[in-house]
Image (tube, coloured by chain):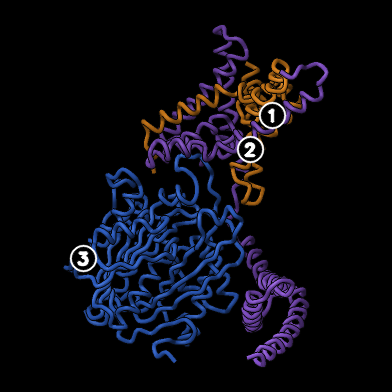
Chain colours: A orange, B purple, C blue
Amino acid sequence: MEMLVRAFVLGGLICVIGQLLMDLTPFHITPAHILVGYVTTGVVLSALGLYQPLVDWGGAGATVPLSGFGHSLAQGAIRGVESKGLLGALGGGIEATSVGVAAAIVFGLVAATFFQPKA
Amino acid sequence: MPAKKDEGKENSKVDKQAIRERIKEREALIAQNFVLAEQEMTRLQQELQKEHQKVLYWEAKAKGAEKEHFNGLRLEIERQQKRLALPEQIVYQSTALRLAPKQTVVKNVVMAFLVGGTICLAGQVILNIFLQNGLAEKEAGAATSALLVFLGAFLTGLGYYDELGKVAGAGSIVPITGFANSIVSSAMEFKREGFVYGVGARLFTVAGPVIVYGTLVSILVGLIYFFINRANFTLL
Amino acid sequence: MAQKKMGKQTLQFSSAPVITSAAAVVGPKEGQGPLGDKYDMVCDDTYLGEKTWENAEQKMMQYSMELALEKRGLLPADLDFYLAGDLLNQIISANYTARFLNAPFLGLYGACSTMAEGLCLAGILLEGGFGERIGVSVSSHHDTAERQFRYPTELGAQRPMTAQWTVTGGGSCVLERIGTGVKLTHATIGKIKDMGVSNSNDLGSAMAPAALDTIKTHLEDLGRKVDDYDLIITGDLGIFGHTLLKELMQKEGYPVERLSDCGVLIYDPNQDTHSGGSGCGCSAVVLAAHLMEKLHKGEYQRIFFVGTGALLSPISVFQGETIPCIAHGVVLEAPSNE
């Protein structure tokens, strides 16, 4: 139960940072820029060992935001290096997030087939 | 014929000198950074245009070092043309900024918090359910991601995710459901251009940079990790 | 000295070509707006039964022209020339409509100022005796504009308060050299004005200086005052752009009570469009449905209709370029005797 509250709070706060960035920076910082920032920040924090504590504390509050995707990428790369050496550096990140990306491709195509964009 | 050519060269020497002097004069004027009166502005613009044309004409006919010289003059004139309008533009843009409608930052932040928190809460609930049903931690995490991607895709397909995005802002963009939304909305939109050139080519229009740069940084992390711990790892 | 040119940028049409008919076809959102019952046709949805929004937009332009012709008892074959434009790459809606009408065709691109641009050129052709009847059409569609200039429509991105909503609609006019109807007496051709704005979500502030420039030049060219007009109405500066223009005009000493904007009139504030309407269709449908009615009833004797356009491309903004804008104006006067 307590984990649910923590997930809510942490997730909310991480999104608030994004909202403030969107509203308070000049207009050329678009949502796309913010998302790239989130992922890469997640990767860097994860590599420095600073993201795991967030995951431990807030669970999905840290893994659901896109920075969590970056965390998976970094951890995947590290594990890849540990098991496969140099090649693991290349493939480890993508491997760890492969399920998410594959799901996105499949659902994207399914949605394109069955749904029409509305006004 | 030779006489005319020499005359032409003489004239151009005189004009060149005059142009260089006028460039210096204008430089002083522009550096003052005042908003110019309309008549003064028009006069300077016409002067600059006349000189630009002349210098361009000479540059086109010249060769070698002379051509480079004219090229330098022309670029100088172009720089002055650009800077001439700046003070007026800056004053205008500050007026526009002063009169601009205010962003509802507080409301946006509150909504981002609530919606983002709720989506993460839902993710936690889903994760707990998977864990309770016997999945290992990593698998449960992957399954949760997949399910959230599905939900984001489904809501996008039904046309609700953009309505959510209007109020939630970052609250719906930052979670992984937003990632799904960007891919699915592109897929749906460009279906009209067919499945190869439309859907296939444009699927990652919005989400692409995320994958590209996320992967790039993760590779860098991997490489750094590898070289730091070189002693412990074999190459393959 | 060219005899029909007044001052720097204004043309005088002494034979006063006439707008004998006009029609507006709009989407549901516009139909729910303040001018809802004035449009000739309000569509139930933005697809009009077509497979793509591009096809729907083209149909709207086509239907608006057909309705304008029908109201006047004419057929496309009666048109000497057809002038049309829209927002899409290569003005595709106009091209296909011209194909349908099969009239000699001049495609125009003035972004949201295209209606005013078309009226200027139609006036020139008729005043010069180069034809008897000319058709002018423009269209825009919210979703075709979004997918070309911004994002896929189902993407959950938030729009800033300065953003405007592209009008889904087509508007057309039939102009004749001789006839009864609203008179076209003068046209002022605009020059490009670029004040260094590069935010494509804030076109109001990009375009306001161009509107100011054209209005000022027009009044100076003809030696007229703002009060010589019952209304000076811009095409689509939107709520914020309109506020800016008023500020700019007041700074120059002009009164602003008679200033209005089609982008402000077309939507109700509770339709949540943020800064009002924009797009080629905006000025066209407000002209056809609302301004023409006012002129015919004599509520306005003389107005200055100033179409405003932001001449950016989807790529120019990504490349960090600023947005060059333009405004063209035409003077419209109430019909003399009905």
Confirm whether circles 1 and 2 share one chain: no
- CB atoms of marks 1 and 2 within 8 Å: no
Mark yes or no: residue A58 visible: no
Image side of residue C190 versus residue B191, left or right: right
Which residue bears the numbered disc 1? B219
Q: Pinpoint residue C228: horizontal percent, then vertical percent.
A: 43, 82
Which residue bears the numbered disc 3? C76
Asked which secondary structure carries label 2, the reply is helix
Residue at screen point 50% across, 39% down: C156
Residue flagged by tag 1: what amino acid is it?
Ile
Badge 2: chain ID: A
Residue at screen point 35% across, 47% down: C53
Front residue of C305 and A42: A42
Image side of residue A90 versus residue C277, left or right: right
Badge 1: chain ID: B
Image quadrant holding the N terminus of chain B, namely bottom right
Image quadrant holding the C terminus of chain B, namely top right
Asked which secondary structure carries label 1, the reply is helix
Identify the residue at the far front of this view: B2
Q: Rounded to the nearest whole Å, what is the CA distance between mark 2 and mark 3?
A: 53 Å
Mark yes or no: residue C330 visible: yes
Q: Rounded to the nearest whole Å, what is the CA distance between mark 1 and mark 2?
A: 15 Å
Q: Pinpoint residue B112: horizontal percent, then vertical percent.
A: 59, 36
Which residue bears the numbered disc 2? A36
Q: Can you tell which quarter of the image residue B169 is in?
A: top right
Image side of residue C62 versus residue C216, left or right: left
Q: Can you tell which quarter of the image residue C11 is in?
A: bottom left
